Image: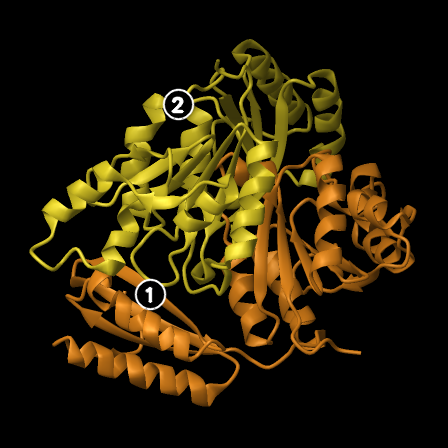
Chain colours: A orange, B yellow
Amino acid sequence: MPVTNPTACLLVIGNEVLSGRTQDANIRFLAIGLGEIGIPLREVRVIPDVAQIIIDTVNEVRAKFDYVFTTGGIGPTHDDITSECVAAAFGVPWEPHPEAWARMEKTYPPGGFNTARQRMATMPRGATLIENALSVAPGFQIGNVYVMAGVPRVMQSMWEWLAPRLHGGPKIVSRAVHALGLPEGVIAEGLATIQAKHPNVDLGSYPFYRPSGNGVALVAKGTDAVTVETVIAEVTALIAGLGKVPIQGEPDS
Amino acid sequence: MPVTNPTACLLVIGNEVLSGRTQDANIRFLAIGLGEIGIPLREVRVIPDVAQIIIDTVNEVRAKFDYVFTTGGIGPTHDDITSECVAAAFGVPWEPHPEAWARMEKTYPPGGFNTARQRMATMPRGATLIENALSVAPGFQIGNVYVMAGVPRVMQSMWEWLAPRLHGGPKIVSRAVHALGLPEGVIAEGLATIQAKHPNVDLGSYPFYRPSGNGVALVAKGTDAVTVETVIAEVTALIAGLGKVPIQGEPDS
């Protein structure tokens, strides 16, 4: 039965993000995608390719959140250990997945489906496949854990397949208003009053510094569109009352 | 006394990263900066502006890692609660910091140092300031926790001041070699053999897909430069043995 207000955690698995070699591009993509289907992302962890850390973290967060998504560590090389660690976390064997195995065996030329590539068709017992249009190697789901590729375009292709199959809660509505030349410190007290009146809306304040001018963007988020609009109307009036021009929407980048 | 092989954890605090509104730019900057001073980043957590989550997370990771860095949540608005949460985590009062208070009071015109801005001069008792050249509001350190701004250019300015004052371990040396037209699945078994021979070097394999051609980048990292060079030499020979041209360094982006 679908959960009413589901929550999600993302595990970004890979030394390359922790060393700074790679600029992560998956957090923001999934944060937006999850918000769109009403499964707000509540935590992200970036962890290294170390078996015990992956196992312990998967077990901690799958008990804590309704959905856990992982990116990274499902390729053919020695540092790709996500799949076997997820099996260990669930206490199930890590074994050839018949469908993934058959598909990959068929794809490669004779001898090409070697030991390394066979790792990509080896999964926790009971896993179901997450398809993607770009690569022959699938991701997989077991329990509430969804294991996806780390390469952004492959992950995104898996997400396109997966997203319509997930059961989200109410979609989160987001509205913004901004003002040029308005320091956060001047509007802060008024914002706190508005936030206190509407605890079901998340009102965020984000200063920006741009060649076109500095200012602050105020963003209201929530599942009740009417209250979100009310909050934005109150913030708009607050900005005007402080002698600045409220501009609906995000500042142009 | 400085730790021999210190480790670091970064807490990115802010709903705006979890909602996808903001593309994080701090993780990679600090990952690289920490590597350069020999304090490898071992975990990142992105957490929301929720007091109990911040308090619990700070307490968990400050016990687990030698250094904890936080970004975000130290501005003047109602959603900036990092500072008071760090005080709660340490079990100390959250009170005006005399030096920060005096400095900020002097900066604003009469009446400008209002209740909201006073929050930025309110810190855990015993905190010492982290200076920055860009904004009047400082970050702070308490115990092994370093609290910095979330706006990247302010955070970077704080880091410039802070980095030379931290006690790092041996610098991590990184060397790369890449090959065009070489699938990971073909080189994987050879890489695993090299990695097994040199457990003190972290050998990573990163496929790339670029207009100029697909291929794989192999990256060796470790504190012993000689072993890192040995590993790269062995990987170079492995690539040549597979009939491809080893190219030293990272692929051009």
Task: Return the x and y of residue A86 as percentages of the image width and height.
Answer: 79, 48
Write the residue at 49% across / 78% down.
A200
A209 vs A77: above or below:
below
Q: Nearer the viewer, residue B247 or A154?
A: A154
Chain ID, mark 2: B
Q: Nearer the viewer, residue B159 or B177?
A: B159
Write the residue at 88% across / 60% down.
A99
Residue A36 in sight from this viewpoint:
yes
Mark 2: which secondary structure? loop
Write the residue at 71% across / 21% down.
B194
Task: Name the residue that disc number 2 marks.
Answer: B166
| Dot 2 amino acid type | Leu
Task: Name the residue that disc number 1 marks.
Answer: A205
Q: Nearer the viewer, residue A143 or B251?
A: A143
Task: Return the x and y of residue A184 as percentages of the image width and height.
Answer: 24, 62
Crowdedness of circle 1 by 10 Å Cα count: few (<14), some, many (20+)?
many
